[in-house]
């Protein structure tokens, strides 16, 4: 169970993950640009699709503000490719099958699902600046309306 919760001002943990096409994306690739990492439970489920499509639909202003959007889940590469293609997602989806990056970012831990305590993905979004510093760490977010909240935090609305 995770006890790691990032706070604004923390250095973003290092990572290296595989994207939907088999390429590698590392935290060092994000230096010099801002990044929004959103951790979601499972590709092609209703809530995750809503959140992913909201990011897709807000991508232009987010990118214009200097941020790269990356979705992170435990899904395998074929499922990530299918999700990306099915919903026209135009940003990378990263696979973290052993949930090590989820844990490092505080997006893994105990949660209540249908009244039962389980350990799993905590829907979370981490906003990182160009120097690799956490600016916002949002945990237990709702899929619906979440991207609108991020747009406000970034001053885009």
Image (cartoon, rainbow, N blue to C red):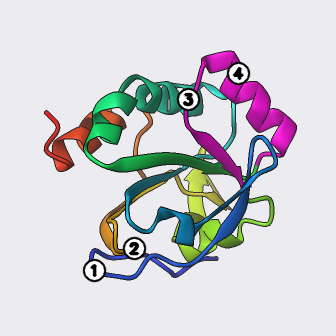
Check whether the beta carbons of the residues at disc 4 and disc 1 lie within 8 A of each other.
no
Question: Rounded to the nearest whole Å, what is the CA distance between mark 1 and mark 2?
Answer: 10 Å
Which residue is labeled 2 in the image? 132
Q: Is residue 128 above or below residue 70?
A: below
Q: Can residue 63 be seen by looking at this rendering?
A: yes
* SS at circle 2: loop
Check whether the beta carbons of the residues at disc 3 and disc 1 lie within 8 A of each other.
no
Question: Rounded to the nearest whole Å, what is the CA distance between mark 3 and mark 1?
Answer: 29 Å
Q: Residue at x 63, y 72 (%)?
A: 15
Which residue is labeled 1 in the image? 9
The first of marks 3 and 1 along the sequence is 1
Quarter of the rendering occupied by the N terminus:
bottom right
Q: Can residue 139 be seen by looking at this rendering?
A: no
Question: Rounded to the nearest whole Å, what is the CA distance between mark 3 and mark 4?
Answer: 9 Å
Q: Residue at x 55, y 29 (%)?
A: 90
The first of marks 3 and 4 along the sequence is 4
Mark number, residue 85: 4
Seen from the viewer's position, the closer of residues 32 and 78 is: 32
Which residue is labeled 3 in the image? 90
The first of marks 4 and 2 along the sequence is 4
Could you say where residue 156 lies in the image, as x and y percent from the top left?
A: 17, 38
Seen from the viewer's position, the closer of residues 140 and 93 is: 93
Q: Residue at x 75, y 41 (%)?
A: 20
């Amino acid at each position: 169970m995770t006890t790691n919760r990032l706070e604004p001002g923390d250095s973003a943990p290092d990572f290296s993950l595989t994207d939907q096409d088999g390429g590698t994306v590392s935290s060092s690739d994000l230096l010099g640009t801002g990044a929004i990492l959103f951790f979601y439970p499972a590709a092609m489920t209703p809530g995750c699709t809503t959140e992913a499509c909201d990011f897709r639909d807000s991508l232009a202003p987010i990118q214009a503000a200097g941020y790269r959007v990356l979705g992170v889940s435990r899904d395998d590469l074929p499922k990530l490719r299918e999700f990306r293609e099915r919903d026209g997602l135009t940003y990378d989806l990263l696979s973290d099958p052993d949930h090590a990056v989820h844990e490092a970012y505080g997006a893994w831990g105990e949660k209540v699902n249908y009244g039962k305590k389980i350990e799993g993905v905590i829907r979370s979004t981490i906003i990182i600046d160009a120097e690799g510093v956490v600016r916002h760490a949002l945990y237990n977010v709702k899929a619906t309306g979440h991207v609108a909240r991020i747009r406000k935090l970034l001053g885009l609305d």
